[in-house]
Amino acid sequence: MAKLRIGSRGSQLALWQANHVKALLEGQGHQVEIEIIKTTGDKITDVALAKVGTKGMFTKEIEEALEEGRVDLAVHSLKDLPTELQPQFELAAVMKRQDPRDAFLSVECASFKELPKGARIGTSSLRRQAQLKAVRPDLDIHPLRGNVDTRLRKLEEGQYKAIILAAAGVNRLGLTARVREIIAADVVCPAVGQGALGIECRSDDGRTKELLRFLDDAPTRTACLAERALLRTLGGGCQVPIGAHAEMVNGQLRLSAVVARPDGSLVLREQQSGADAEKLGVEVGRALLKKGADQVLQEVYGEVAAAPQQP
């Protein structure tokens, strides 16, 4: 059987994901090692993600290790993986998706609706901020970086009335004690690829691609293909206020998407269904551009020092 090396970020969640894949591969009889690689996004922890604006900030160094042959595969949160990979890389598997929605965590408030006026909320996501402000303009939203444990500690210490995290990550780590509500996707549309794991390998490594084939979940890949095509069409990175959620409804793929101003003063929405995932993503993206999404995104890029280009 094969000996495989997995490249992973060193965060608690990234290591859970890498070890999850490691266990599945070992179940197939393979020998597996994990190499921890520190990425740009891991090194910059005191700046809101949207202000960093670095292309592939959570993947670049891992891809370098992959290209150099130091690792055979990389396990990513799919939402961190650029929509266009370099030709030497391939998305070998998209694993079955967990809950793609966002979770509302609080010590005192039983639900988002119960937040008092002017409550301080922690999130570094412009996507979450924009949609929360659209519903509650009074909220005081502050950047929140660090691993899940750090964010939860800040919540427990009372620095925030509530924090918003991806439901999948909280579930995977078993840290659901403070989850009060899973926010409906039509209130806060999830990030592209949220809840799914993407496994990347070298395009010319046929052996590894074949070994990873059993991890690929076709329905998840199809949904994420539509979401990623939308993001690519809009020209947005993973740190801009774009949300997308694709799911099968009555045998057809339905894609809902949002582009919003960070202050919540404008929220553009589009929803379409179709059979071709890639085409659906492009069409929904073009419809949002016609509604003025390009202007909204240009405003955002103007506010951050280094605008994230096509990821």
Image (cartoon, grey):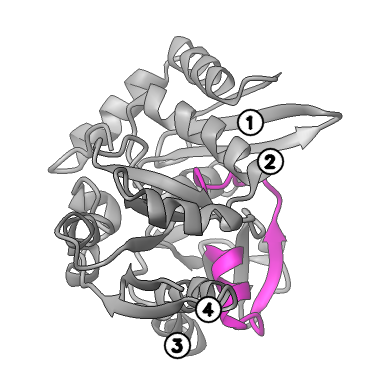
Q: Which residue is mark 2?
A: 186
CB of mark 4 within 8 Å of CB of mark 1? no
SS at mark 3 in the image: helix
Q: Which residues are magenta?
A: 165-193
Q: Amino acid at mark 3?
A: Arg
The mark nearer the N terminus, 4 or 1, is 4
The mark nearer the N terminus, 4 or 3, is 4
Above/below status of 177 relative to 121? below
Q: Amino acid at mark 2?
A: Asp
Q: Which residue is mark 3?
A: 153
Q: Residue at x 28, y 50 (%)?
A: 50
The mark nearer the N terminus, 1 or 2, is 2
The reply to whether residue 139 is visible in this rendering is no
Q: Residue at x 38, y 28 (%)?
A: 232
Q: Which residue is mark 4?
A: 26
Point out residue 155 in the picture as x, y percentages from the top left corner: 49, 81
Q: Which mark is residue 256?
A: 1
